[in-house]
Image (tube, grey):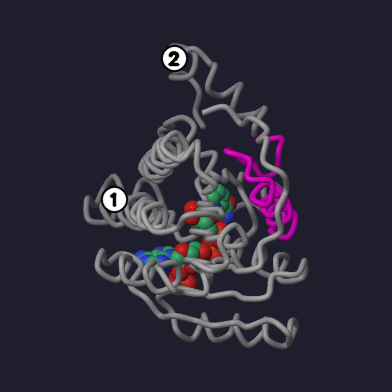
Amino acid sequence: MPATASTTASTWPTDLVIVGATSAIAENCTRLWLEGGASRALLIGRDEAGLDRIATDLRVRFPAAAINTSVTDLLDVPSITSAVQGFAGPGTPGAAAGAGLTVLIAHGSMTDQAESQADLAKAASVLQVTGVSPSLWMEACADTMTAGTIAVLGSVAGDRGRRKNYIYGASKGLIERMAEGLQHRLAASPLNVVLVKPGPTATPMTAGMPASGLAPVSAVAADIVKGVNAARPVVYAPIKWQVIMTVVRLIPRPVFNRLDF
Ligand SMILES: NC(=O)c1ccc[n+]([C@@H]2O[C@H](COP(=O)([O-])OP(=O)(O)OC[C@H]3O[C@@H](n4cnc5c(N)ncnc54)[C@H](OP(=O)(O)O)[C@@H]3O)[C@@H](O)[C@H]2O)c1
């Protein structure tokens, strides 16, 4: 899917819904959106203590903003349906926010490829948490929201399957096809879908990786917020990954198969 510039003008959200709000990338994005003037944030996740810690911090930093939390099983279909109805269904503040509502879907898990290959249950969990669940959140949002923006954290890992992380990469590839299809379906509507593709970023997910190859999470979040506000269909963060992954995608298969990365 090409990372084209959108014709939509940049809009700063008034209302935020963050799914997987304990993610370090999501937390940094939430902070930036609130700094820029968003007035309400609903933080959704599975970890009550983690959500409370982030909400408390945000309430201190942004006393004028309304910060709420919701402990939700992110993988459970009825829970997804009811959560989305609760924040974007008819009569909710989210529905009233219209174009001012931005939903960021951020959760995912990256198990070691060798572990996922050796244990199908682990592979199933990565695919479920990182691919299927975010896709269902996107679908539920698209079926409920009438305006605003649905943003989802994919990854550069979804751009081409590689022996070192294709199970995680496949789940991000699923997100990409979902985002692409929803963008096609909603092309004539005021509801935007933004696929974000971060490169390797310094967060708890990448703890243990060499720091030199990781972008600072604050810089990645700034690129994400800018791209989501502009409703760009695809946002690479940092932008250099757009060039790198274009080259990676173009490497002919016989050459690619000899590369060990
Ligand atoms: N860091 C990177 O290099 C990088 C690069 C590209 C894309 N991404 C993507 O960016 C997103 C955020 O990652 P991050 O770097 O911010 O990592 P992170 O801080 O480790 O956040 C991971 C998030 O996923 C949630 N999660 C993990 N397993 C879950 C499960 N079984 N059920 C529900 N929620 C679960 C975590 O919730 P808990 O707090 O409850 O565990 C947390 O909110 C992910 O989708 C990731 O794939 C990250």
For label 2, the SS is helix
Residue 92 disc label: none
Q: Name the image quarter holding residue 170.
A: top left
Residue located 41% across and 57% down the image: 141
Task: Give the residue pinned by disc 2.
Answer: 253
Q: Kindly check if marks 2 and 1 are in contact, taking CB atoms under 8 A apart as contact.
A: no
81 sits to left or right of 211: left
Magenta stretch contains residue 2:
no
Determine whether 45 is above or below 165 in the image.
below
Q: CA distance from mark 2 to mark 1?
A: 25 Å
111 sits to left or right of 244: left
Determine whether 130 is above or below 260 in the image.
below
Residue range highlighted in magenta: 215-241
Q: Could you tell me the amino acid type at mark 1?
A: Ala
Crowding at dot 2, Cα within 10 Å, few <14 / some 14-19 / many 20+, comes out as few
Q: Is residue 207 visible?
A: no
Residue located 41% across and 44% down the image: 175
Task: Give the residue pinned by disc 1.
Answer: 123
Residue located 54% across and 69% down the image: 96
Nearer-N-terminus badge (2/1): 1
Q: Position of residue 180 (x, y in %)?
A: 45, 35
Crowding at dot 1, Cα within 10 Å, few <14 / some 14-19 / many 20+, comes out as many
